[in-house]
Amino acid sequence: MIETANPEIDVDALMLRLRNRVAELRTNGHQQPLPVNAIKLRNNVFINSLEAFANIADQKSQVRTQWPSHLGGPLFRVARVRKVFLDGLSFIFKDQRHVNQALVAAFRESISLNRQLIEQVEALRQEIEALKR
């Protein structure tokens, strides 16, 4: 049985409420379809979040032109040293940057395909509803 540290909570009443709710869901069914507006909103949020991820990845794949302020030190206070170091990092990670940009482009194409598929599914759903009437 469930133990409680709070004497104000009636565990038996809580268990009875839970059992009643489970029984109600079993009889009425808990797989009710979502309203059309909720489905559209969910799909828009999904696509927008994917686009936000792609934008962040695209932004991070750019060549670094400034030294981060939190990475200081006496050596990196000299502008020439910072420039040489940044140029070196740019050269070392050139291939990785190209790979990242290709992945971002592929991800954007995937987002576009997802958007088209969602629109086609919505059109088919509307056709089915029209045929049911």
Image (tube, rainbow, N blue to C red):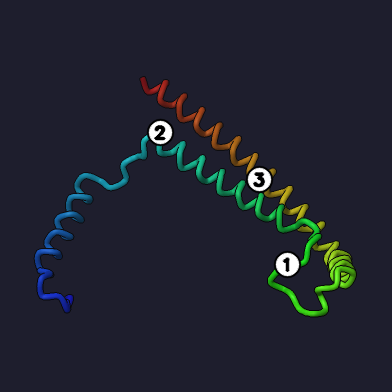
- Kindly check if marks 2 and 3 are in contact, taking CB atoms under 8 A apart as contact: no
Query: In the picture, residue 7 is in which quadrant?
Result: bottom left
Q: Nearer the viewer, residue 31 or 91?
A: 91
Residue found at x 83% / y 66%: 93
Image quadrant occupied by the N terminus? bottom left
Cα gap from disc 2 to disc 1, whole angstroms: 47 Å
CA separation, marks 3 and 1? 33 Å
Please tell me whether residue 54 is drawn above or below residue 84 in the rendered image: above
Residue 116: which numbered mark, if any?
A: none
Earlier in the chain: of badge 2 and badge 1, it is 2
Which residue lies at the image location 73% right of the left edge and 54% below the top edge? Answer: 103
Q: Amino acid at mark 2?
A: Val
Does 56 sit above or below residue 82? above
Q: Give x and y (percent) for residue 84.
A: 90, 69
For numbered disc 3, what is the local secondary structure? helix
Name the quadrant containing residue 82.
bottom right
**What residue did someone put label 2 on?**
36
Tell me the SS state at disc 1.
loop
**Residue type pointed to by label 3:** Ser
Sequence order check: which comes first, mark 2 or mark 3? 2
Locate residue 19 relative to residue 78 in the image: left or right. Answer: left
Residue 110 — which label? Answer: 3
Q: Is 132 drawn above or below residue 47 in the view shown?
A: above
Q: Is residue 92 visible?
A: no
Using the image as rendered, state which of residue 19 and residue 36 is in the foreground: 36
Q: Quadrant of residue 119?
A: top right
Q: Is residue 75 visible?
A: yes
Q: Kindly identify which numbered label has been placed on residue 68.
A: 1
* Quarter in which the C terminus is drawn: top left
Position of residue 2 measured from the top left corner of the image (x, y, whole percent): 17, 75
Contact (CB < 8 A) between labels 3 and 1? Answer: no
